[in-house]
């Protein structure tokens, strides 16, 4: 199957020239003669720019990895052969193409399965895996904020909030989390009378004071990297009582600078315990069926070990993760080696 000519997911315009096709074929031939790992990638132009940096491609070549852009104007099965397909495109048509490709090319690792990714595109289901875990151990407790889904009728939001017992202030997020700028916009509602100004479908989460610092936990297979980001400041009860209305914010983690080098209160800056993050990541990899994602985690202010996962994103901005080039290339090599060992075992 191929994408339609006017498909919004086409990243390339026009058919490739004959010389280009011959050149690609020779690259694939040479790569497989030298046992190079060939990674086909289908990313948005924005993701390509932020992720496919010269340093990554150069390091990959030195490690025997060849990145090849997938031509979305040609059938996927006619391209390659690939060892790995790396993707972040949306749309039902693209998901169908990938699913068909996975069925006919079981030897290729697709990062990640389209159906598993789709699970994270809805904030109603996104955090369910974390809630089901109810992780509580000696290193800490991990949960999700109390939340409410509003699919339509903004006029009923106030009553719905009272009925389920949500406490103000409330963070409002779009229900659909598809990676667009709109899906990352959030609002803070201070009083129940202003809630009808919100635009469903959306998710309302109780705001948890967390000292204005959020932990972005990047997960690449079994590798974990944590960075601090400035977040929304604490809200006092006095502010809740005197404030009214809806305050809209841009994408918080994008707008905020890194908090890693800031002079912070040690109680706020301390990273979550490594063993806790490793257990959380391992369990979520299994439950979600994903290997490339990140968690936005906050620590409840005034506690040392009570954490909340407030968002999960597939294939996040790894370009902002320290040493992502080394971590990602090692991950890709590990995938191929693991698959080779399984083949030789049977």
Image (spheres, rainbow, N blue to C red):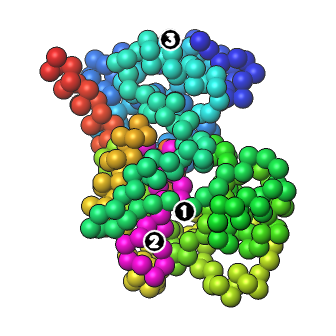
User: Mark 3 or mark 2, which is nearer to you?
Assistant: 2
- Alpha-carbon span between mark 3 and mark 1: 46 Å
Judged from this view, the residue extending furthest toward the front is: 163
User: Mark 2 or mark 1, which is nearer to you?
Assistant: 1
Depth check: give the residue in front, 235 or 55. 235
| Quadrant, the C terminus | top left
Specify the label residue 78 is tagged with. 3
**Image spot of residue 240 (x, y percent):** 70, 81
Q: Are marks 3 and 1 in contact (CB under 8 Å)?
A: no
Depth check: give the residue in front, 32 or 340. 340
Q: Is residue 285 above or below residue 187?
A: above
Mark 2 vs mark 1: which is more N-terminal? 1
Task: Name the residue located 45 percent from the left edge and 47 percent from the top edge.
Answer: 129
Mark 3: which secondary structure?
helix
Task: Name the residue located 58 percent from the left edge and 20 percent from the top edge.
Answer: 96
- Alpha-carbon span between mark 2 and mark 1: 11 Å
| Quadrant, the N terminus | top right
**Residue 217 seen in the current view:** yes
Quick check: is 139 in the magenta stretch?
A: no
């Amino acid at each position: 199957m191929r994408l339609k000519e006017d498909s919004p997911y086409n990243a390339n315009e026009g058919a490739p020239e004959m010389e280009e096709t011959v050149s690609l074929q020779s690259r694939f031939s040479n790569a497989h003669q030298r046992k190079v790992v060939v990674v086909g990638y289908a990313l948005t132009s924005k993701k390509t720019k932020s992720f496919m940096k010269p340093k990554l491609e150069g390091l990959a070549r030195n490690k025997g990895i060849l990145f090849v852009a997938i031509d979305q104007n040609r059938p996927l099965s006619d391209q390659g052969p690939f060892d790995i397909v790396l993707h972040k495109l949306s749309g039902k048509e693209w998901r169908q193409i990938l699913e068909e490709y996975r069925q006919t090319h079981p030897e290729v690792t697709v990062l990640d399965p389209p159906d598993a990714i789709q699970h994270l595109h809805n904030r109603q289901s996104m955090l369910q895996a974390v809630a089901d875990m109810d992780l509580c151990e000696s290193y800490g407790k991990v949960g999700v904020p109390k939340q409410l889904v509003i699919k339509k009728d903004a006029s009923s939001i106030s009553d719905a909030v009272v009925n389920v017992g949500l406490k103000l202030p409330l963070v409002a997020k779009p229900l659909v989390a598809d990676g667009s700028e709109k899906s990352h916009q959030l609002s803070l509602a201070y009083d129940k009378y202003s809630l009808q100004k919100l635009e469903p479908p959306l998710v309302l989460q109780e705001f948890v004071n967390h000292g204005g610092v959020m932990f972005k936990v990047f997960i690449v297979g079994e590798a974990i990297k944590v960075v601090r980001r400035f977040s929304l400041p604490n809200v006092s009860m006095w502010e809740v009582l005197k404030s009214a209305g809806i305050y809209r914010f841009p994408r918080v983690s994008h707008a905020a600078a890194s908090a890693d080098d800031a002079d912070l209160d040690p109680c706020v800056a301390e990273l979550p315990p490594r063993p806790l993050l490793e257990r959380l990541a391992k369990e979520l990899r299994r439950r979600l069926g994903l290997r490339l994602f990140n968690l936005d985690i906050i620590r409840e202010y005034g506690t040392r070990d009570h954490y909340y996962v407030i968002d999960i994103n597939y294939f996040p901005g790894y370009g902002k993760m320290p040493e992502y080039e080394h971590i990602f290339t090692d991950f890709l090599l590990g995938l191929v080696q693991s698959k080779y060992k399984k083949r030789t075992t049977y």
